[in-house]
Amino acid sequence: MNILVCISNVPDTTSKINFTEDHKAFDVNGVQFIINPNDEFGLTRAIWFQQKNQATVTVVTVGDSSCEPILRKCLAIGANKAIRIDTSAKDGFYVATQLKSLCEKEKYDIIICGRESIDYNGGMVPGMLAQMLKLPFVTNCISMEVIDNVVNAKREIDGGIESISSSLPIIIGAQKGLVEESDLIIPNMRGIMQARQKPLDVIDPVSSSAKSSVEKFQKPQEKESVKLVASENIDELISLLHNEAKVI
Amino acid sequence: MSIIVYAESLNGKFKKSAFEVLSYGRALANKSKKSLVAISINADDPLKLSNYGPDKIISLKDPKLIDFTAQNYANVISEYSEKENISILILSSSADSKYIAPLISVQLEAGLATNVVSIPESLSPLVVKRSCFTNKAFNNTTLSGLINIICVSNNSFGVFENPSKPEIIDESIQSKINSCLKVNSIDKASGTVSIADADIVVSGGRGLKGPENWHLIEDLASVLGAATACSKPVSDMGWRPHSEHVGQTGKPVASNLYIAIGVSGAIQHLAGINSSKVKVVINNDPEAPFFKAADYGIIGDAFEVVPKLIEKLKAFKS
Ligand SMILES: Cc1cc2nc3c(=O)[nH]c(=O)nc-3n(C[C@H](O)[C@H](O)[C@H](O)COP(=O)(O)OP(=O)(O)OC[C@H]3O[C@@H](n4cnc5c(N)ncnc54)[C@H](O)[C@@H]3O)c2cc1C
């Protein structure tokens, strides 16, 4: 079994989000980058397939050389090889086109993406890739088992859970639940040493154009400070919510 | 050229987001002088949409589309979009709409922006404002497709009545099912409000000490007709199901009112709930970061404050 896990390089969840002075770019100063959490749940699930079903796990990212540390981390977690498609991620469509080209060359049985990245929050790449490759696609995926080439998956829907089956190959949009937080693998010394020997191939992008571009960023307006209500004075809170905020 | 809105329904009933995206579509159609077409799939009462200003309603009925399957819904919406000579397609940001949007965008070779929070700032080029960094920031995105898709963030635009006399087209169709995905079963908690659809969300954190105290959250939610949610450690410890975990790595919340009880207000928690309109915090630690993010707050012990709040709300409601 061949598994591809698509990895996005995102600012650590505790990062202060700031932009360059012209508001055109994210200010990377002092920011630590991590594996997008949704992707990491997917990677962990892939490693389980590797351990149980002898799957080969390849990780891929579309990005410049500054993304290599997180690819090395994926290798230290246990991925067999890494690929970096050497270009900057212009938009979801552009990234999906790059991944499509890779997926047409190699044959993957399972392609796992995070359901969305925590920086751009587009949630577009997995679905676009699925449609480009005309493969079945399960997003918000919280469980996946493969028996005799049949995939049984569960998907979180608004207010419930849907059970789905499909054939391989398949594309998955991963999220928490696919594995638990406590299942995430922290690389040990041996993993880190081995990662140095594992292949990290850099390949050229295919030509493609983006269909959207980000012009400028802005931060939300500073909000007014909280109105405190004394704990003996619940009626006042109810009155504020009713008359002032008009939400009850 | 027309603007098409997909008006989402569940079990035949329109979701509130259907009226919101249609209101958004009306405003955009006025601004761009295009006609506004609403598409519904297996909706019981498509005429309901005429309260929100469409020029035309295409009401599709298809026994094969009773259950939502992304591929089939995307195929049908793409097909009708092409027939209507579409320039912009508007969807909500519900889980289902965000599922089908990228599929449709490839089918129509369209530009796509999700989590859009307001009417486009410019029409040519088409520039939309969307939230990013899990609500910690916004960006202006230029969409450069010949056709473009906008997924409107829930509860960001609002619902505006605007009665119209639309042309109604009823069509019974039999879509070809060509997806090898099969839905085997759907397991839905009945009688409870889902976080995505709720106007009010009541959320509990580790400050509630244990699952046995969750009746406080549930009772408060039931008086308010609210959905229940929780912080990440609460779902990690198994006190509550994962489906209730909200925040940067959980579900986003965009309700009118968000009440956080015993939640400290960590940056990852706040990120996911920031687009709620009004935030109330109840916490016994005046230093809890949530007080910086909230509109109203009570410094106090949840075990004393919440039962009183439930009592008073019951009295207020009756
Ligand atoms: C990568 C990453 C992603 C994350 N994603 C998320 C996410 O999506 N969502 C999320 O919620 N968290 C997330 N977190 C975790 C986050 O950092 C916090 O740890 C978490 O939100 C804290 O949960 P809490 O507020 O319930 O618990 P605590 O931080 O323990 O807060 C409990 C609060 O309850 C108060 N309290 C205690 N007793 C009482 C009482 N009797 N009455 C009233 N108040 C009381 C305390 O004063 C305290 O403020 C993430 C963390 C990481 C590293």
Image (tube, grey):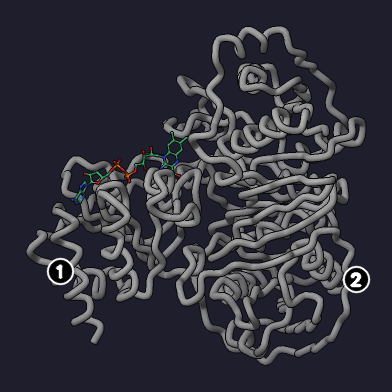
Is residue B182 positioned above or below A132 on the image? Answer: below
Which residue does the image show at 22% across and 76% down from the upper left?
Answer: B313
Q: Chain of mark 2?
A: B
Q: Amino acid at mark 2?
A: Lys
Quadrant housing the C terminus of chain A = bottom left
Q: Estimate the x, y position of residue A241 in percent, counting from the top left.
A: 25, 69
Quadrant housing the N terminus of chain A = top right
Which residue does the image show at 86% across and 69% down from the upper left?
Answer: B79
Q: Residues within 10 Å of mark 1 (few under 14, many from 20)?
A: some
* Sequence-first disc among 2 and 1: 2
Left or right of B38 on screen, residue A184? left
Residue of label 1? B308
Q: CA distance from mark 2 to mark 1?
A: 56 Å
The answer to whether residue B87 is visible is: no
Which of the 4 image quadrants contains residue B318?
Answer: bottom left
Residue B176: image tag: 2
Q: Estimate the x, y position of residue A3 in percent, counting from the top left.
A: 78, 33
Which of the 4 image quadrants contains residue A229?
Answer: bottom left
Q: Quadrant of ligand 1?
A: top left
Left or right of B144 on screen, residue B91? left
Which residue does the image show at 33% across and 69% down from the upper left?
Answer: B221
Q: Estimate the x, y position of residue A240 in percent, counting from the top left.
A: 21, 69
